[in-house]
Amino acid sequence: MAEINVLFLVPARDFRDEEYAEPRKILEEAGYNIKVASTTVRNIRGRFGLEVTPDLQIEDVKHEGFDAIILVGGPGAQEFFRNMLAHQIVNNFYNAGRIVAAICIAPSTLANAGILKGKKATAYATELMTLKNQGAIVSPKVVPVEVSGCIVTANGPDASKEFGEAILKLLKEKAEAPQE
């Protein structure tokens, strides 16, 4: 089996601890390699005190070598809403057929990057209008996790485990699919 590499894009401050920790735990337990990117390589701190040391800066992110990118939410995730480099990275992963996932308010970065047009998606309640305005299909009822092709979105911290499991399922399906 080929090595599976997953990149987390984490805000430099005020990310939601569980939105990072739960999916990471699920993917590490499956034997996948995890790297973390942020706007700094200094220690970053979650909203509730979780400290993470990023492996690389956002400027050094390349989609080659990674099977998925996961954008972590929390108040700090707003730093990527209008960040053109973050949008370019998301588009590069998406256009290369990689899995692109975002939780909480982070799906707004995907929407602003233009990859949610015509896709089912969800996000934290405050961001649903942004998703709709950017052409996403948003369910009228609260949906914790949406999977649309290679895109996974989730609505917040309570969905962290289900979000991680949905990403794991997609990664396994892609790994088992015949290579072109």
Image (tube, helix red, strand yellow):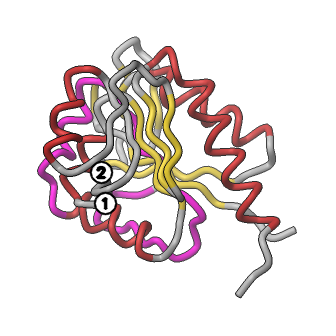
CA–CA distance in space, label 1 to label 2: 6 Å
Return the residue found at the far bottom: 180
The part of the image, by quadrant, that contains residue 122 is: top left
Verify whether residue 61 appears in magenta. Answer: yes
Report whether 10 appears left or right of 82: right
Q: Is residue 69 visible?
A: no
Find disc 2 in the rendering and name its residue. 110
Magenta highlight range: 56-84
User: Which residue occupies the foreground of this view, 68 or 129?
Assistant: 129
Quadrant where the C terminus is found in the figure: bottom right
Report whether 9 appears left or right of 178: left
The part of the image, by quadrant, that contains residue 26 is: top right
Verify whether residue 128 appears in magenta. Answer: no
Question: Considering only vertical position in the picture, is 120 above or below 67?
Answer: above
Q: Position of residue 12 (x, y in %)?
A: 29, 37
The part of the image, by quadrant, that contains residue 42 is: top left
- Residue visible at 55% across and 52% down? 35
User: Which residue occupies the foreground of this view, 120 or 145?
Assistant: 120
**Crowding at label 1, few (<14), some or many (≥20) Cα neighbours within 10 Å?**
many
Question: Considering only vertical position in the picture, is 64 above or below 34?
Answer: below
Determine the secondary structure under disc 2: helix
- Residue visible at 82% across and 65% down? 176
Find disc 1 in the rendering and name its residue. 115
Give the residue type that dot 2 points to. Leu
Quadrant where the N terminus is found in the figure: bottom right
- Residue visible at 18% across and 52% down? 112
User: Which residue occupies the foreground of this view, 136 or 67?
Assistant: 136
Give the residue type that dot 1 points to. Ile
